[in-house]
Image (tube, rainbow, N blue to C red):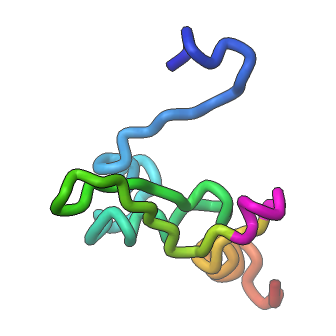
Amino acid sequence: MRKCLKSSCRSVKNEPRIHIISNMPPYSSAVDALCKFPETGTALGVKLDERDNLKLIAPCGISDVINLEVKPTLFLQNYRTSRNFTGIKI
């Protein structure tokens, strides 16, 4: 990936194990993992359907990607509020 995207800053994570680093319970599914991404615009995935066609998985929708907007996912909002900003409503 680094060879293909030399000028681009990217981070690749082993999602099945990221919960260990994040000190969280394991994800129950790929959609569950996507819902816990920090921003809506990166909470996207693809999978093969029964006919080997690519299917978009976008639990937070795609409008932020289309509109080039960066917004926190509901998970991040709740995580920050409950763990770091007790008593503050975001």
Q: Viewed as shown, does residue 57 lie left or right of 37?
A: left
The furthest residue to the left? 50
The C terminus lies in quadrant: bottom right
The residue drawn where x is 77% and y is 67% is 71
Q: Tell me if residue 17 comes above or below residue 42 in the rendering.
A: above
Q: Tell me if residue 41 comes above or below residue 73 in the rendering.
A: above
* Relative image position of residue 6 (x, y in whole percent): 67, 12
Q: Viewed as shown, does residue 17 lie left or right of 7?
A: left
Res. 83 visible in picture:
no
Magenta residues span 63-70
The residue drawn where x is 63% and y is 61% is 38
Q: Tell me if residue 68 comes above or below residue 18 in the rendering.
A: below
Foreground pick, 29 / 25: 29
Q: Viewed as shown, does residue 59 lie left or right of 6?
A: left
* Relative image position of residue 11 (x, y in whole percent): 57, 33
Foreground pick, 3 / 16: 3
* Relative image position of residue 57 (x, y in whole percent): 44, 65
The furthest residue to the top? 3
Res. 35 visible in picture:
yes
* Relative image position of residue 46 (x, y in whole percent): 40, 54
Looking at the rendered structure, the number of numbered marks drawn on it comes to 0
* Image quadrant assignment for residue 85: bottom right
Task: Determine if the magenta segment contains residue 68.
Answer: yes
The residue drawn where x is 24% and y is 61% is 49
The residue drawn where x is 16% and y is 62% is 50
Foreground pick, 4 / 80: 4
* Image quadrant assignment for residue 68: bottom right
